[in-house]
Image: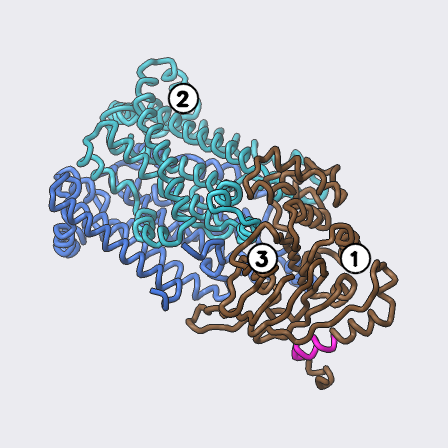
Chain colours: A blue, B brown, C cyan
């Protein structure tokens, strides 16, 4: 492996690790050591069957609909409020404690309350997605606004720019990197939120499917669904990152930072 | 006596190609000599210094110190860094003793052994302070004391005053010279500043770049001890002018006259 | 989700800095705003709650506090809390131990990082609540599965942050240590480990938060014992004030742990914060 660049070498090692792990799992599964670990081959077979079944696709559609309804407004209003909080100190003083409080507490704990208020239906699921995503977007957008270089603002003012121009042409572009980070994080959290809420209800969506499969001890199918959810999460966050890179070509990618250890 | 024989260094680049940082570098440094290395950015002078320190291995050639080849860091050499590289979580005295700690002594012992060296650089008052409370010049003194505390024969200094403002820099140069007069160590000093090289050194190696190699080695025929006034003597100004002429040509300045 | 973009805020709250007011305002101004806004929210909560015709869905703040006060006097409440708390402690400690160990290995050895990357990345992107049914199939609904769930929730963040803390130790510091010919173990103990400490502390703080989330997830998905059972009971009997009170108790617990973790982090990594203030 000497001729390969470090990056490719690592990719090979990762692949080896992945294949190795799956091989060990297959072995454990074949030995039938525990009902919780079916052989990989059985899971793969289940994937083919489950991912194309109407039961799964319906559940997937339900979850996606919830996200599609709740996430965009949460993002839009979150960014809006974040811009205000980041730019105007009084807004920051007034809203910071509330926002920080919401971020410090385990939001999951609010789910029973939401179910009490909105009932055991889509309303609670939407509410869950919103509280999971709204505050994180606000905080990251506000942080992004605060990275605005005051000297650039001064420079723009010296050329006669008004408040709205400064907002649009200086503050907003400066805030974009962290704003996107917030959107990316929020996307992951939206998935987490919709799944846990659906699990609590236990009937609809992918979360509900997980609970039912678990209750029926249908382990292979369960893993198939879990795998999908995990991959879906990965793919959506990658998608946001890709959009981010296209939209913000001037931001250095994190891999460009050289860490201290390049050997071993 | 440090001998640099046929040193070359090749780096692999990210796209799979390679880049030759140093090629066929040959020179030697005498005992107790103050030897500076100057050259344009990217000529590999820091890489060369790190090779003597044993932190980087050459891809060609060898380095010998008193006949023994350099294979890694050793007790006979100590380094001073441009960005000081002090431990932010430890106080000044602990920092000075850190080289000793790394070589196996206990913290208490190292601190005790370090105290005289802290005094040598005039910062005993600040023993219990933390690096971030000190100015740049003071931090570098701590770095210097740390290097001296391990008792090396050879001091390797990588643009040690590069991060300091011009006035502090000049003071530090004078202090370093006084210290060197007392300590009598071999010093290899990498710098960007021609004034600094001429003021401090016995000899100056001017490096060429792409790839890094020896362009010429200049004698500094200014008698010691040296003081401030040396900077205004004609020997000094001629020397620095010559260095500037060489460097300018290498840096691709289109307004420079054709090389002699 | 980490590693974070420079400055991005993940699951934890931004460290609140006292905002310096613009010229002319007194230093008390931000505090007036803060207390004012929290107070305003509580007031609205109280009034809106009282305005409700029924206490089925929304309860005034005072009722919730009253219910919590009453509950705190019962042994039943504290028994339930103990049943929730014990598996949390074990799972949390386990996640710290395993997470820090794994993180050190991943941060220090690129090979180990590459080997484990597919698993860590997947586990990080997956909503861990989906693993609860697996834990149940594995261990039933007793302490063991609860400990496992809390562990799974916490371990990823601890690992990732510890690894980042180790990996991003300044190259200069490592080189300086090497230049003094330090042996690898000594280098690790005296340079790399202390330099990684802020990252490790951040990992502990964030991981603790996630472990608390895991604890609550266990309570609302595996409701046989503990606080979850109380929640289920109060919901069934429409004792909304009590329900809110239990939720509030869980929330207070979560916030308290966060505050303690942050204090601890500040104390251990004090030099870093001092440094950043000067910078």
- Look at the image and tell me whether residue B163 can be seen: no
Reading the image, the residue beneath label 1 is B170
Q: Quadrant of the N terminus of chain A?
A: bottom left
Q: Quadrant of residue C218?
A: top left
Q: Which residue is mark 2?
A: C63
Judged by depth in the image, the label closer to the viewer, 1 or 2, is 1
Query: Does residue C271 appear anywhere in the picture?
Result: yes
Same chain for labels 3 and 2? Say yes or no: no
Q: Nearer the viewer, residue C4 or C194?
A: C194
- Span colored in magenta: B244-252
Q: Secondary structure at mark 3?
A: helix
Residue B247 magenta-highlighted: yes
**Type of secondary structure dominating the magenta stretch:** helix
- Residue B160 percent coordinates (x, y): 68, 56
Which badge, 1 or 3, comes first in the chain's sequence? 3
Q: Secondary structure at mark 2?
A: helix
Dot 1 falls on a residue whose secondary structure is: helix
């Amino acid at each position: 492996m000497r001729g390969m660049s470090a990056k490719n070498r690592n990719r090979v090692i990762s692949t080896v690790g992945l294949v190795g792990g799956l091989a060990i799992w297959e072995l454990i599964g074949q030995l039938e050591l525990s009902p919780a670990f079916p052989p990989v081959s059985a899971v793969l077979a289940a994937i083919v069957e489950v991912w194309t079944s109407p039961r799964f696709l319906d559940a997937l559609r339900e979850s996606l609909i919830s996200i599609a309804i709740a996430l965009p407004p949460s993002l839009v209003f979150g960014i809006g409020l974040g811009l205000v909080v980041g730019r105007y100190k009084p807004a920051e003083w007034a809203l910071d404690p509330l926002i920080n409080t919401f971020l410090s507490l385990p939001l999951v704990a609010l789910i029973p309350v939401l179910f009490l208020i909105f009932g055991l239906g889509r309303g609670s699921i939407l509410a869950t997605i919103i509280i999971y995503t709204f505050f994180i977007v606000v905080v990251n957008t506000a942080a992004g606004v605060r990275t605005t270089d005051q000297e650039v603002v001064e420079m723009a003012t010296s050329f006669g720019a008004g408040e709205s121009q400064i907002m649009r042409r200086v503050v907003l572009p400066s805030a974009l990197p962290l704003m996107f980070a917030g959107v990316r994080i929020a996307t992951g959290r939206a998935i987490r939120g919709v799944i846990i809420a659906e699990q609590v209800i236990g009937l609809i969506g992918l979360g509900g499917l997980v609970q039912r499969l678990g209750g029926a001890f249908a382990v292979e199918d369960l893993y198939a669904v879990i795998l999908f959810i995990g991959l879906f999460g990965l793919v959506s966050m990658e998608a946001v990152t890709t959009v981010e890179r296209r939209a913000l070509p001037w931001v250095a990618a994190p891999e460009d930072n050289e860490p201290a250890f390049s050997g071993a | 006596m440090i001998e640099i024989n046929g040193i070359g260094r090749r780096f692999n680049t990210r796209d799979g190609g390679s880049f030759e940082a140093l090629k066929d570098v040959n020179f030697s440094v005498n005992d107790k000599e103050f030897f500076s290395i100057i050259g344009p950015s990217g000529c590999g002078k820091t890489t060369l210094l790190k090779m003597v320190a044993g932190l980087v291995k050459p891809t060609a050639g060898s380095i010998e110190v008193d006949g023994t080849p350099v294979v890694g860091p050793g007790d006979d050499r100590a380094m001073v860094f441009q960005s000081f590289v002090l431990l932010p979580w430890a106080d000044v005295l602990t920092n000075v003793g850190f080289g000793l700690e790394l070589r196996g002594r206990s913290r208490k012992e190292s601190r005790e052994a370090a105290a005289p060296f802290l005094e040598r650089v005039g910062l005993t008052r600040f023993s219990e302070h933390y690096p971030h409370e000190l100015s740049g010049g003071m931090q570098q003194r701590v770095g210097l004391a740390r290097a001296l505390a391990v008792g090396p024969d050879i001091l390797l200094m990588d643009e040690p005053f590069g991060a300091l403002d011009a006035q502090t820099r000049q003071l530090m140069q004078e202090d370093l010279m006084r210290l060197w007069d007392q300590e009598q160590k071999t010093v290899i000093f990498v710098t960007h500043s021609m004034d600094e090289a001429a003021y401090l050194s016995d000899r100056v190696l001017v490096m060429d770049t792409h790839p890094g190699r020896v362009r010429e080695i200049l004698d500094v025929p200014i008698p010691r001890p040296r003081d401030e006034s040396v900077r205004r003597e004609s020997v000094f100004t001629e020397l620095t002018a010559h260095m500037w002429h060489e460097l300018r040509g290498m840096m691709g300045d289109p307004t420079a006259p054709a090389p002699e | 989700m980490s590693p974070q973009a420079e400055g991005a805020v993940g699951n934890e709250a931004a460290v609140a800095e006292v905002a310096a007011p613009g010229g002319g305002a007194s230093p008390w101004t931000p505090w007036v705003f803060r207390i004012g806004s929290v107070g305003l929210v509580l007031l609205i909560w109280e009034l809106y709650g009282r305005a409700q015709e029924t206490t089925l869905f929304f309860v005034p703040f005072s009722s919730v506090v009253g219910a919590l006060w009453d509950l705190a006097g019962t042994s039943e409440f504290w028994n339930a809390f103990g049943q929730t708390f014990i598996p949390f402690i074990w799972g949390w400690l386990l996640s710290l131990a395993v997470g820090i160990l794994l993180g050190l290995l991943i941060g220090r050895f690129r090979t180990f990082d590459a080997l484990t990357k597919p698993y860590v990345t997947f586990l990080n992107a997956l909503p861990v609540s989906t693993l609860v049914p697996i834990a149940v199939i594995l261990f039933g609904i007793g302490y063991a599965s609860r400990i496992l769930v809390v562990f799974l929730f916490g371990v990823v963040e601890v690992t990732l942050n510890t690894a980042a803390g180790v990996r991003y130790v300044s190259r200069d510091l490592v080189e300086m240590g090497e230049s003094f010919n330090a042996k690898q173990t000594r280098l690790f103990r005296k340079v790399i480990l202390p330099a990684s400490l802020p990252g490790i502390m951040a990992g502990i703080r964030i991981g603790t938060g996630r472990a608390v989330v895991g604890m609550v997830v266990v309570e609302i998905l595996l409701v046989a014992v503990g606080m979850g059972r109380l929640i289920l009971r109060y919901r069934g009997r429409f004792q909304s004030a009590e329900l809110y009170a239990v939720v509030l108790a869980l929330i207070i617990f979560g916030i308290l742990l966060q505050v303690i973790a942050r204090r601890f982090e500040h104390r251990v990594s004090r030099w870093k914060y001092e440094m950043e203030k000067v910078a």
